[in-house]
Amino acid sequence: MDFAVEYLKLDQLRALQSERLKDLVVYLEEKSDFYKEKFDEAGISNQDIRTIEDISKLPITYKQDLRDNYPFGLFTVPKNELQRIHCSSGITGKPTVVGYTEEDVDLFSEVVARSLNAAGAKPGMQLHNAYGYGIFTGGLGLHYGAEKLGMSVLPISGGMTSRQVDLIIDFQPEVLCCSPSYALTIADEFAKRGISADEISLKYAVLGSEPWTEIIRHHIEERLGVHATNIYGLSEIIGPGVSMEDFEEKGGSYIWEDHFYPEILDPVTKEPLPYGEEGVLVITTLTKKAMPLLRYWTNDITSLYYDENAKRTMVKMKPILGRADDMLIVRGVNVYPSQIEEAFSHVKGVVPNYYLTPIEKEQMCIGLDIDLEIDDELVAEENLNINSDEYLIFAGNFGESIENEIKKRVGITTKVKIHAQDSLPKCEGGKINRILKTK
Ligand code: DLL
């Protein structure tokens, strides 16, 4: 595979994006009743689009537009030209349907292959693919991308953790991919069997499909002996492989912007925000054929930036803070679960397996209950018996120090309940939901 496009000079990249955007608008005028109507309403035509900067003249597309046109209303090719159909996970309502032509499947494989390469994977390596196979884009997306890069794939899908670990031991793959919460479950299973990180064949873990922070990266890297990197994407745009971290850089992800043009918009005014400012990520698919989307409102909160020391020229995005609809408003303070995760990571001895329960009074969220695990090693270091009164006092104080840290960093009041390690439910594969029903 040729990765040259990742290193294009910025002016060449902008020229490529401008050409692609112009072609796309002409294509949509011809093929999409949905967009043709939107262009007419806004009084614009392909003549108004000369460079990529003109993108802000184009209409924004929302998930609701996909729902209103369920299932195939936004497709721009007849059904017999499709090669594949996937759906979004449907966490926030009716699933949205996406279609791919043969060319789109190639594009999908290419951006995933690029992502695996950035994650450290090489042709000839073996991928243990624990993303779900099925209508979810994770399993097949990583599968085709790995094959394109020249890797072999074990299509194990999610679940049955003990079997996963048996096969990692027997087959010695170098690369793992799954959700970060499931990587923690796999790491727990290795620990339970007394197998240490240096005895595990894995070298790279390609993790995404849900928000995660540095504490989770730290736990996974330490316990599996891997470079853990972040892969981001969403079905409506293509699936995994919209953006990817480099395993030697980490901290933010390159957006493959020759295909997916990103903008950050203000969540309220919907005006474009400058680099560095946090807002909603909006993406235009510059090259997709079966279901191109203009300025798709992902609902994911992040910011874009250029990193002076970056290897590639493409823009980077910060880790996703959360989906706009996962935001909790606790006594007027806006909070994402990932901010709580970041805050408690500053207390030594926390295991990042946790659940948040909003407490409501008169339909207002007035606080959060947090259930959180404590590291066995800390309990052992303190020489405490888990059934003793001393342990209860210790756990109470430990919980309080976490509450203080959250108050200091996020500004909200919480009630932390400490649990022994491995006692809270774990991710059994797929995405985890850390927010429980309101009390
Ligand atoms: O989750 C695609 C995917 C599969 C990405 C495997 C990465 C790995 P959907 O089911 O459509 O597609 O869900 C998309 O998941 O809008 C984000 O809210 C969230 N998400 C995906 N990746 C990340 C990530 C897949 N790395 C939705 N960090 C997106 C944070 C993520 N959130």
Image (cartoon, rainbow, N blue to C red):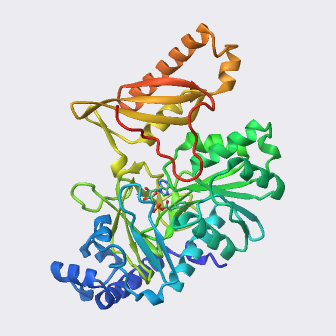
Q: Is residue 241 something that shows in the picture?
A: no
Name the residue at 58% across, 40% down: 426
From this viewpoint, which residue is outermost toward the bottom? 30
Q: Quadrant of residue 275?
A: bottom left
Q: Quadrant of residue 3?
A: bottom right
In the image: residue 274, left or right of residue 395: left
Kindly identify the residue that appears in the image at 47 percent across and 75 percent down: 259
Looking at the image, which residue is at 51% across and 56% down? 209
State the residue lying farthest toward the top: 389
Q: Residue at x 25, y 73 (%)?
A: 59
Q: Position of residue 299 (x, y in %)?
A: 35, 57
Q: Nearer the viewer, residue 29 or 416?
A: 416
In the image: residue 141, left or right of residue 330:
right
The x and y percentages for residue 357 are 40, 34
Compare residues 327 and 385 and report the one nearer the observer: 385
Relative to 162, say whether 35 is above or below: below
Q: In the picture, residue 74 is in which quadrant?
A: bottom left
